[in-house]
Image (tube, helix red, strand yellow):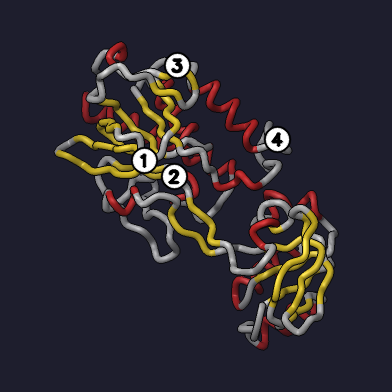
Amino acid sequence: MVSLAAAPVLSGFGEFSKNGNDHFLYDVIIIGGSYAGLACALTLGRSQRTVLVIDSGAPCNRYAPFSHNFLTQDGIPPSQIAAVAKEQVLKYPNVNLLSGKAIHAKKTGDQFVVDIEEDKSFYSKKVVIATGVSDIMPSIPGFSECWGLSILHCPYCHGYEVRNHTTGILANGDVAFEMGKLLSNWTDDLTIFTNGFSSLTIDQTKKLGEKNIKVIEKEIASLKHNQGQIEEIMFKDNSSFGLSVLYNRPLFKQHSNIPELLGCSITDSGIIAVDTEHRTSVKSIYACGDSMAKIRSVTFAVSSGNTVGLMLNKELIDEQF
């Protein structure tokens, strides 16, 4: 292994020292330094691997004031969890963290080259994609202001805090039906808003009615809120509906184009295709966190990052032994 003394080091979060040696070969570059990326870095750091984490500082859950359903961290602000995680990961001298945005990556022979916006390049034997996804907000005035505060995506993450509240679901068809079933566990006051003609089947509509879940097909004009706390849905026919929480699963896209640049296969649902050990379709590239997960939660992100760290270290050992 190359001496770590030759590696670039951090003098502080986000301040990368310029030592003139850009060609240090890391064992692993992790693109994305939120929960999944940091969990992976921790495992690899403890495995005595040289690791560079490149993070742009825009985690998907940055809009949520608190994180829930994560053992020992329930109810803690996401930024606080991340700060502690960075502090703990950087105790391992073979792990470096760079605040910056990876804009390009390619494989050259048996090495990877990752470029960042600051016109610097870094090299590694392996790459981990932990860049997450970006949600695409519906074009409804007021929606983005409420996202993560009173418009929620997951009852396991936030449902307990708004249990028994007047609750809405912005969805249609099978998604609306399945969300209605799920959320009926947290409240009896539940209404589905299809924002236009309902594509629920007759049987689905009947079943929802039997459970006292209403379906409103009116087109939505805007959302009335007070500093992100939703108060009413305003319809295009000038009527309104009062509520205190709304669930929605917006469309999303990969947060970074790095997976595409590296040739990683993407599933029809928009996540990176991986095998059971989180390998992508490209040799020596792994993925963890929201970028490859159907389940979006802090707990799963940490678990997947840890798994990738274990699998990657084993792969490196097998190659060197």
- The residue indicated by pointer 1 is 102
Q: CA distance from mark 1 to mark 3?
A: 20 Å
Any part of residue 103 in sight:
yes
- Tell me whether the residue at label 2 lies in contact with that at label 3, contact meaning CB atoms closer than 8 angstroms: no
Q: Please determine whether, in this image, residue 247 is positioned above or below residue 149.
A: below
Q: Where is residue 186? Give x, y as percent.
A: 78, 59
- Tell me whether the residue at label 1 lies in contact with that at label 2, contact meaning CB atoms closer than 8 angstroms: yes
Question: Of callouts 1 and 2, which one flags the residue occurring earlier in the amino acid sequence?
Answer: 1
Residue 111 located left or right of residue 298: left
Residue type (three-letter) at the residue carrying disc 1: Ala
Q: Secondary structure at mark 4?
A: loop
- The residue indicated by pointer 3 is 11
Residue type (three-letter) at the residue carrying disc 4: Ile
The residue shown at (68%, 33%) is 73
Question: Of callouts 4 and 2, which one flags the residue occurring earlier in the amino acid sequence?
Answer: 4
Residue type (three-letter) at the residue carrying disc 3: Ser
Q: CA distance from mark 2 to mark 3?
A: 24 Å
- The residue indicated by pointer 4 is 76
User: Is residue 116 or residue 198 the one in the foreground?
Assistant: 116
Point out the frontmost of discs 1 and 4: 1
Q: Secondary structure at mark 2?
A: loop
Q: Secondary structure at mark 1?
A: strand
User: Is residue 225 or residue 295 the one in the foreground?
Assistant: 225
- The residue indicated by pointer 2 is 131
Q: CA distance from mark 4 to mark 2?
A: 22 Å
Q: Where is residue 59? Give x, y as percent.
A: 54, 43
Any part of residue 306 in sight:
no
Q: Where is residue 288? Give x, y as percent.
A: 44, 43
Residue type (three-letter) at the residue carrying disc 2: Thr
